[in-house]
Amino acid sequence: MSRVLHRSSKMTFPKAVSGHGIELTLADGRTVIDASGGAAVACLGHGNTRVAQAIAKQASTIAYIHTLFFTSEPAEELAELLVGHEPGDLVRAFFVSSGSEAMESALKLSRQYQVERGQPERVHYIARKQSYHGNTFGALSVSGHMGRRSIYEPVLLPNVSHVAPCFPHHYQQDAETDAQYVQRLGDELEAEFQRVGPNKVIAFVAETIVGATSGCVTALPGYFKKMREVCDRHGALLILDEIMCGMGRSGTTHAWEQEGVSPDIQTVAKGLGGGYGSIGAILVGRKVIDVLDAGTGAFVHGHTYQAHPVACAAALEVQRIIKEERLVDNVKAMESVLGDALRRRFADNQYVGDIRGRGLFQAVEFVSDRNARAPFARGVQFSERLKANALALGLAIYPNGGTIDGQAGDHVIIAPPYNVTSAQIDQIVELLGDAVDLTLSKLTQ
Ligand code: PMP
């Protein structure tokens, strides 16, 4: 009997014993192609010896310091690499150990910013439905993910409200142009500011590309500019969660580079350490830092393991490799290779409703009726079955249910490492096709 409290006590989890590139080896000798890097984490693939050596070197040099007393070389160098060139006026980095911790830090720093600039009456966050920002109480409170919220709903923060995401495939009306849909969403955000009281809002929070909840949903052109305008008009900060879609996964280092805006605070995590270190970060804009520097200068927040030297050394090496090997360019180049392969394999499948995404962050949405864009009944558990069938065929992918409204809908995310080749993409799509066929054949039996 395992003493680990696993994700489910009703399932047994195969033991992964080693990994190399996109391949994992299990204890029983089977191999699995990791086509999603877990949850879009393993951006360099597995078993990178350069990163392993950097970790070993740091662990044997100085593994831990407390940031109340000291700083460390890898933390300093990583911050320099991330914000030394001040992308989008982001000028400082604060390192934590996970995506959820990064979101907590962003939520707290935005509140402190408002207090220090003399607006303590700002107590409310506006976020979006069908979103996921993490599992700690603050991060879950801003998340719209119904499944993950439901049992905690009565104890989540009351000072958070949710507006609609930009999700054209399901929510743009037939008669509506892109510009009209964006305007409607801008009007909805404005109305929410007015309902709450415009001087009550701390920040608006959104994933630049929606990840697990709805499956790689990109915003329409102009959407984030519109949201930024509303925030600026009312003195609220824009927090962009790029924990899943950031650090190169979208084909640019930051997904916001393709949206014509930059955030006041950005969260990153998965692609930052690529799974080699447990690390997340907030990248903080000059506007926020200036207020903090002119005020207390001290962020009223911290963790024992923040800026952990080994985690920072791992992330630093991962980021150096991405730069040296120009892997973000490969993400961009592979975007159409993956998209075309998915379209070739699934375009004629009547149970595939949409294929979408950006860079190496793409999703396939499944439907029971393509014309009506109608989902499978939840009881069918399509995404769960697909995950199991894919794994049996030797493919690990990242499926989720609740795509459309938090309950209905199924999708699967494909997020291979940035150094994936087109031959590997073909292999992934072929196996995914087999897994989908198997799942559908069992449904219709
Ligand atoms: N935000 C987004 C967009 C995420 O995808 C995730 C993780 N799936 C988180 C936040 C939370 O990160 P973590 O699981 O590392 O706490």
Image (cartoon, rainbow, N blue to C red):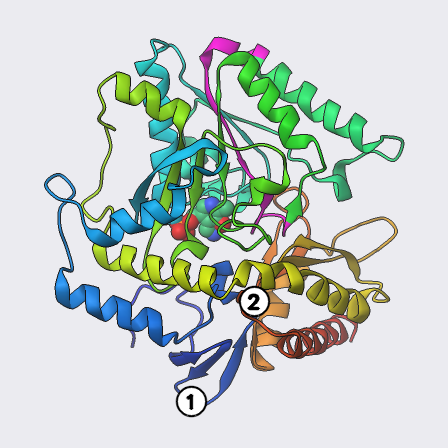
User: Label 1's element?
Assistant: loop
Q: Residue at x 67, y 31 (%)?
A: 223
Q: Mark 2 points at which residue?
A: 416
Question: How many other residues sit within 10 Å of disc 2, few (<14), some (14-19) or many (≥20)?
Answer: many
Tell me where the magenta segment starts and ends, as one range. 194-216
Give the CA distance from mark 1 to mark 2. Answer: 24 Å
Give the camera-side residue of 262 and 280.
262
Q: Is mark 2 within 8 Å of ligand 1?
A: no
- On-image quarter of the C terminus: bottom right
- Residue 38 seen by the camera: yes
Give the camera-side residue of 276 and 368.
276
Q: Is residue 398 inside the magenta stretch?
A: no
- Left or right side of 62 for 207: right
Q: Mark 1 points at which residue?
A: 28
What is the x, y in percent for residue 149?
48, 41
What is the x, y in percent for residue 254?
53, 45
User: Label 2's element?
Assistant: loop
- In the image, residue 159 sits, relative to residue 422, either above or below, namely above
Q: Which kind of residue does numbered mark 2 sit on? A: Pro
